[in-house]
Amino acid sequence: MDLEQDYLEYVIQFSLSLFAISAASFIDPTNPITLGTLIIVPMLFGYNAYISRNQFKYSSFLGFISLMFVPLGPIMAAVAITVSVGNLLVSFFAGGTNFKDYYGATMLPLLITGLILGSTLYGAASYQPSFGDEIRTGIADTAETQTSTILEETNLVKNIVGGQQEAATQMAKQVSTTTVVATEAYILNQTEANLSAQEQIAIQQAFSSAREDIPNTILRSSEEMELENQNLGVSGAISEGIENLLVGDRIIIVVPLVTFGMYGLQPLVGLLTAIFAKLTQTVSRPKESESSFSQS
């Protein structure tokens, strides 16, 4: 391979590595849509898998430029380790030009990278207790948020306690309806001498609608507030349980969690990597043929 091709590979690897770690700065843990910016990572893996199809490429070491962003936070650190270590391993395990070959090029790299990430988190938590507290709080808060979202979307708590609420709902409706009727009688009695028959009829019609609307409005507001409190209670209990589970040396559980969590991304990351590798192959083949023809 000529120097021009080598230079191009180094430039592309360097650029994609910087783009990938820069995209991590836009990630918002509370907004899953922002994770879409990480598509540059499998784009880098796909390009690297293609150029490494025949042999290991030293240009893959340029991914380690992303490690300079590690001090900027846990998310940036996780992406930086994934980009640097993962990219190097993809080049090492890559081989073949079939879609299946490109797909499999990220399997072991993701597993090994997850193990390194998990071990790094455990080591940092062990030597720096404050960092361990941040990990516990972060995992617990994430679990609480996701649990609350699931409960709200599925109305799980509402379905569980629905039978218990029915009697209270009927009683509240009767009380609110009785209150409206009593208010109607009081107002009509107090204004009978001062209002015309037409005005009294208008008041009666208004109260007739109020007998239906006001109890329903009160019940809806009450049910929404009660359901929200119940959701918070369930999600809060789960959050507290997870935080207690990770107390002390038991935080070592983050190692298998992160390891298998990263490996669980293989279907998506492998598919995207294979797609980008095939796209790179399609674009590069005409250029390689033209280069071979000019040399001959």
Image (cartoon, helix red, strand yellow):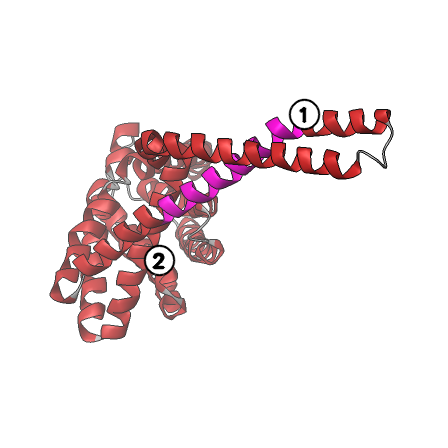
**Is residue 213 found inside the magenta-colored segment of the image?**
yes
Q: Amino acid at mark 2?
A: Gly
Quarter where residue 295 is shown: top left
CB-based contact (under 8 Å), mark 2 and mark 1 = no
Q: Count residues near mark 1 (Cα–Cα under 10 Å), then give few for <14, some for 14-19, many for 20+.
A: some
Element at label 1? helix
Taking the spot 35% from the left edge, 38% from the top edge, the residue there is 273
Residue 208 has which mark?
1
Foreground residue among 42 and 278: 42
The one of 130 and 218 positioned closer to us in this rendering: 218
Residue 115 visible somewhere in the drawing: yes
Residue 213: % across, % down: 62, 30
Residue 192 belongs to magenta span: no
Residue at point 36% right, 38% down? 151
The image's mark for residue 63 is 2
From this viewpoint, which residue is outermost toward the left?
249
Question: Residue drawn 35% across and 31% down?
Answer: 162
Q: Secondary structure at mark 2?
A: helix
- Residue 210: image location, x then y, percent: 65, 30
Residue 137 as seen in the image, left or right of residue 208: left
The residue under label 1 is which amino acid type? Ser
Question: The C terminus is located in which quarter?
Answer: top left
- The spot of residue 202 in percent (x, y) is 79, 27
Query: Going from the N terminus, do you reach mark 2 or mark 1 first?
Result: 2
Q: Name the foreground residue: 227 vs 114.
A: 227
- In the image, which residues are magenta? 209-232
